[in-house]
Each structure stands twice: as C-alpha cells, then as structure tokens.
Image: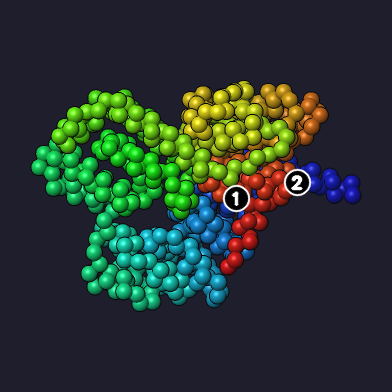
Amino acid sequence: MKFNQLLKRKLRKPDKVNLAGGQAHTQSEKLELVTILLTSFLEDQFYRKADATAARLRELVAKIADKRFVAKAALYARREAGMRSVSHLVAADLARSVKGEAWTKDFFDRVVHRADDTLEILACYLALHGKPLPNSLKKGLGRALARFDAYQLAKYRREGGALKLVDAVNLVHPPHTEALARLVDGSLAPAETWETRLTQAGQAAESESDKAALKAEAWRQLIRKRKIGYFALLRNLRNVLEQAPDLVDDAVALLTDESLIRRSLVMPFRFRVALDAIEGARPSFRQSMAPAFAKAMGQEPVTDTEEDLPQKLVRALSAAADRSLANVPRFDGRTLVAVDCSGSMIGKPMKIASLFAAVLYKANRADLMLFDNDARYTTFNRDDATLSIAQRIEEKAAWAGTNFHAIFQRADRPYDRVVILSDMQAWIGHHTPAETFKRFIAKTGKRPRVFTFDLAGYGSLQFPEPEVYALAGFSDKTMETLRFLEADKSALIREIERIAL
C-alpha cells in the first residue's frame, strides 16, 4: 500500500515543459484530442501555428487505438459544439485508417451538418491521401448529400472553388434526388443568400445614393422574409445599423428568437465580437451612414430614433447571449472564478474567458479574480448585462505574464470550488502551483475542487489530470457539461462515449 501511494505521487509530478517554458502536466491522449477538437479553428495561435496544431491532431488520431471514440469526439465537436475544420480533418484521417468497419458509413453521414462539409472532408482527404476514395467515405457522404434540399445545395455549390459541389456528387455517387439531379444538369437556381443579394444591389446601382437605397432594400427582403441565417445576421449587425437602420427592430426579433439561437450552433463568444462591432459603429453612426440612408430614401433624419438604435442592438445581443447560456450551472457553496489576463489571451481566448467568467459570476454570486503577473479580486454590478460585465473584464486585462501561484497566494477565504479560465501556459515561477495550492488549503482549512477551463488546447495542465475537473470548449454545450463535472471528473469524456455509433 505504501509503495502504491509512493508510485502514485511520483507519477503525478510535472512531466513536461509547456509552450511558455514552465512546468506542466501532460494530458491523457483522449482529453488532449477532445480539447483540440473543442478549441481549435486550425488558425495560428499565440504559442502554436495552425500547421503544428493540425499535425498534433493527426498524431492523436493515429495513436488512439479506440477509433470509435475518435469518431464520436469529431461528431460531438461538429454537431454539438459547431466546430468545422477540425472535424473535417479527423474524418479524412479516419477514412484512411479505419477499414471494413460498418459504423464508418454512419459516422461520415452524421458528421456532415451543412452541404459544404462534404466538400471540405473530400478536399482534405484528396489533399492528404489522394485517390481512390474509400467506399465507406463515398457511401456516408453520399447519404449526407441526399439529405439536402435545393436551397441548401444551391447555397453551398461553391462554383468558384477547386472542388465544387457537383464534383462531390460525381465522386461519391449519392442516392438520386430531384435536387441533386438539378445540381448536376445545371438547372438548379442560384440561392438568394445575403452575399448575392447585396452584390446584385451594388452592381445595379447607378450612383452612391442609389446603391444605399438598393442595399437597404436587399436587407429588408433578407431580414423581414427571414432569408438570412442567424450567424450571418450576427456578423452583419453593423452593416444593418449603417445601411438599413429602419430594420433594427426586425433584426432584434431575429436575434432574440430562442429557437434560432439553439439551431444556429453559434458560439456565445460571437455575441461579444458583435457587441464590439456595434460599439465601434456608435461614434460615426449619426454623422455618416444614417443621414446618407435617410437622404437616399427621401426622408429626413430622425435624430432621437437614430440615437436609440445602437442601444437596441446592444440590449438584443445581451438578451441573446443570456439565452444561449441559459443552462449555466448554479453551484452550492462559495465559488472563485479566476480569469487569465496574460498576453497570450489577447483576442478570441479573452472574449471567451470574459464571457464565461461573467455568466458564472452572475449565476453563482461568485468571487471574481483576474490574474497575470499577480492576481487581484475585482467586483462588478451583478445586475449589469452579461456582455457588459464581460466587456469590462477584458478592459481590465493587463496582458502581462501568467502566474498560477498568484491565484492561491491572493485568495483570502475558503472556497468550495475554483474555476480557472486560461490557455494553461503558466510560466512565472516555472513550477506548477502544487505547493502553493497546499499552502492555500492549510491557510483556509478547506480543499476546493479545481476546475480548469482550457481555452487553447495546447496539450498541458497545471494540475495532474486526476486531481482536477478538466473542461474545454466555446459553445453553450460546454456550460451544460460543467454542471455534471462535480459528480464525475470525466463527464466530458463520458458524454462523448455515450454517443451511439
């Protein structure tokens, strides 16, 4: 028994150096795979380039013997968390490495959420492995293509791409449908997307005032007839505000429609990005775009209404963000939420961290701490909107170093749990915070549960995996999973394992 405990302690010593040069603990291969799938857009990050992330993901797919788990993780990432490129890469590598398994056809069908997912998976497979295509891949993607109607096929036909949707049909030979037949013979009408409507408006205009009027009419048709997707609307709120301010009330109705929020798979941090765009439009709104619109439509500017329009969108974004995160857990006892404000968190990681910290802070009446070189408590009005608190957290960020020790050095009261939102690349002090954490327990007389919320997927932890409640991801589903972690440290992995395949 004594030797077992000795071995256990030895195995839990730091076993790697993280990308920032500090001590760290290795993640299990399954957890690292899931973390990358739920955090990576295969873009360059502060500590790692996109190609290196893709290479590590492919290494994990090859190393993990349980390929069904790999497939389930990709399904979870695509269907529950809305992650695209990483799921395409995993699907392509699974098609190469798994042969003769009946479940693969079902996987390739279900991992396709939009028609263009088939294109990306095929392009990835052909780029990495060339021809011929495995039969299971052709059958699964063929079944997926047969699910889409004429509008969905037209919307994602990708006529200008190296691989067009009609090429995908010719490669995988899907079951016959009328829509697919029209795609192949060229009789499928173009989809009226927001991009095409606005392009047509610009091309038809004979003057700048004419262009303003035509673009406003294009927005009117798209929004009032609900022919714009939720994510597209979110990305274009500033354009709507500047080009068609009379549609703000209609946009608000769409933004706050809970059924649309749920179906969209939009990640909550996108509301923070949209908020920044609206805030950026405020100074110039009255002086420029709104009067130009009014003149083009033969109207006089209505100053009071114009003054209120950005605020209407801000309120709608706040309501939408709250609805997207309606399942945030309410914990018993006392909670500390610690937000990493180091330089490597600039951009997307901080937008995610600040939003999740704000919603946890409000829902649990938690204490809030910001840390970088040092750590400090901070407070906000809990009655403020979630997005407003998130914005103020980001404004207070110092963008300095990363010191996990400071969390437990500055925390001055006992907690039931500590939730740390970070990219996990601590380096100040170089050692992991194990000894500092022990001193905190001795000082307060209580050992809190430590939740580590990985926002970058770099493959390391500051605490040994068996001793923390590890989570990753950017979607509303991530917050739902957080509810179950206290009862089961492996809740995220088990949720993926429960997927039927």
Q: Quadrant of residue 469?
A: top right
Q: Nearer the viewer, residue 481 or 21?
A: 481
Query: In the image, is residue 10 above or below residue 82?
Result: above
Colour treatment of the image: rainbow
* Residue type pointed to by label 2: Leu
Q: Is residue 487 above or below residue 76?
A: above
According to the image, label 2 marks what residue?
11
> Within 10 angstroms of label 1, few (less than 14), some, or many (20 or more) residues?
many
- Left or right: where does residue 174 sit relative to residue 67? left
Q: In 3D space, how far apart are the residues under numbered discs 1 and 2 (Cα atoms)?
A: 18 Å
> Residue 427, how many percent across, how many down?
61, 31
Across and down, in percent, residue 185 comes to: 24, 73
Q: Nearer the viewer, residue 103 or 95?
A: 103
For disc 2, the neighbor class at 10 Å (few under 14, some 14 to 19, many from 20) is few
Residue 192 location, x and y as percent? 26, 56
User: Who's the residue at 58% across and 45% down the image?
Assistant: 327
Is residue 165 visible to the viewer in this orientation of the structure? no
Task: Farthest residue to the left: give it.
Answer: 206
- Of residue 19 and residue 260, the one placed in the foreground of this image is 260
| Percent coordinates x, y for residue 58 in the rendering | 52, 57
Above-or-below relation of 435 to 4:
above
- Closer to the N terminus: mark 1 or mark 2? 2
Quarter of the image where the C terminus is located: bottom right
Q: Amino acid at mark 1?
A: Glu
> In terms of secondary structure, where does tag 1 sit?
helix
Camera-near label (1 vs 2) is 1
Q: Which residue is mark 1?
A: 32
Please name the residue shown 89% across and 49% down the image: 1
Classify mark 2: helix, strand or loop: helix
